[in-house]
Amino acid sequence: MAKKTEASPAGYEQLKKDLAQKQPGRFYIFSGEEDYLQRYYLGMLRKQLLDGPAEDFNYHRLTQENLTAQLLYDSIEALPMMAERSMVQVDDVDLFQLPEAERTKIAETLADLPDYCCLVLTYSADAFKPDKRVKKLWEAMQKNAVQVEFRYQSERDLKAWIVRHFRAKNKLISPQTCDFLLRYCGVSMTHLDMEIEKLCAYSEAPEIVQADIEAVAEPTIEAVVFEITDAMAQRDFARALSRLDVMFKLQPEAIPILAAIGSQMRRLNAAKMLMNAGKTADDLAKLYSLQSFAANKTMSQARRLSERSCERAVLLCCETDFKLKRSYDDPKRLLEMLVLTLAEEARHD
């Protein structure tokens, strides 16, 4: 039976079910921000479909550079050698932008996929944005594909995954240190996987501790922004500026740094308003699609700041953005002045 395309967790669950039953479907569309999971499940599909002496013969990978409607058709129709099925992987190609004749032929191909082939269209981040006005192609996808969106995992799932990864390397990590690792390194499994490798190579002790993370792990810009906000609330000018220096090492361009700081200031302002309205961190998490630890941290910071400071912080970020984009002064000096002014504003609370 044809499976409908769906941008919901149902597609992800369907993929897991297919693999658990060792019966991969005929057509998947992979997209989403968590590329670690996309690579993991592509590997699982390849293992189940192509595990044999003719793996290279039965695997076809197409990209923007070589894809044509005819090559896609030929790859899909090619009979597998010494195996029951073949796999065709198409990476980051917007089929909806192809010439009409190409789109029409591809739509016809997708509407009649053979049972012996598994087609996977992969897209980085949120690049899969179907143009539903291209009706024939969209209908062929909608009727035949399972859309799998790999989203950042929940805090609970991430913690379990982190513990398993450390255990596989004969290392322990406490729940508290696990929390710190997520706050410090973010929720990308790709980034966390690299940091876990570094931590296990660095520490000779049986258990990973916070000091290990601070010594060798690379923080995310968002984690450093939280530290700057903490320093603001504590009126610690030196620490706020030192963390800004860390941000410049992670991201040498001023505008992305300001964007990160500005986003947190807006979240702080929203947290303050929600708090005044009797709302909770859960409401903030829903509003900004935050992990629970990030929402709780933001609410905690907002409690230490006045409503006036939160509002002023947003305005100061807007003013700095205006100056940056008009080359008003040296970008780093503008951001240093912003951080100092934010801390000074907090001092008057």
Image (spheres, rainbow, N blue to C red):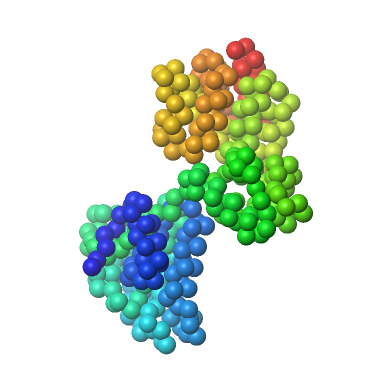
Looking at the image, residue 169 lies above or below residue 56: above
Residue 124, horizontal then vertical, whole percent: 46, 56
| Image x and y of residue 165, in percent | 60, 56
Quadrant into which the N terminus falls: bottom left
- State whether residue 43 is above or below residue 157: below
Task: Where is residue 325? Give x, y as percent.
Answer: 55, 33
What residue appears at the point 49 percent right and 29 percent down from the top-left corner? 267
User: Does 246 sit left or right of 312 as displayed?
Assistant: right
- Residue 191 visible, this orientation: no
Residue found 68% across the figure and 54% down from its top: 171
Q: Is residue 22 above or below residue 15?
A: below
The one of 326 and 346 positioned closer to us in this rendering: 346
In the rendering, at what x and y percent does residue 289 appear?
44, 38
Quadrant in which residue 274 is drawn: top left
Q: Residue at x 54, y 15 (%)?
A: 306
Q: Quadrant of the C terminus?
A: top right
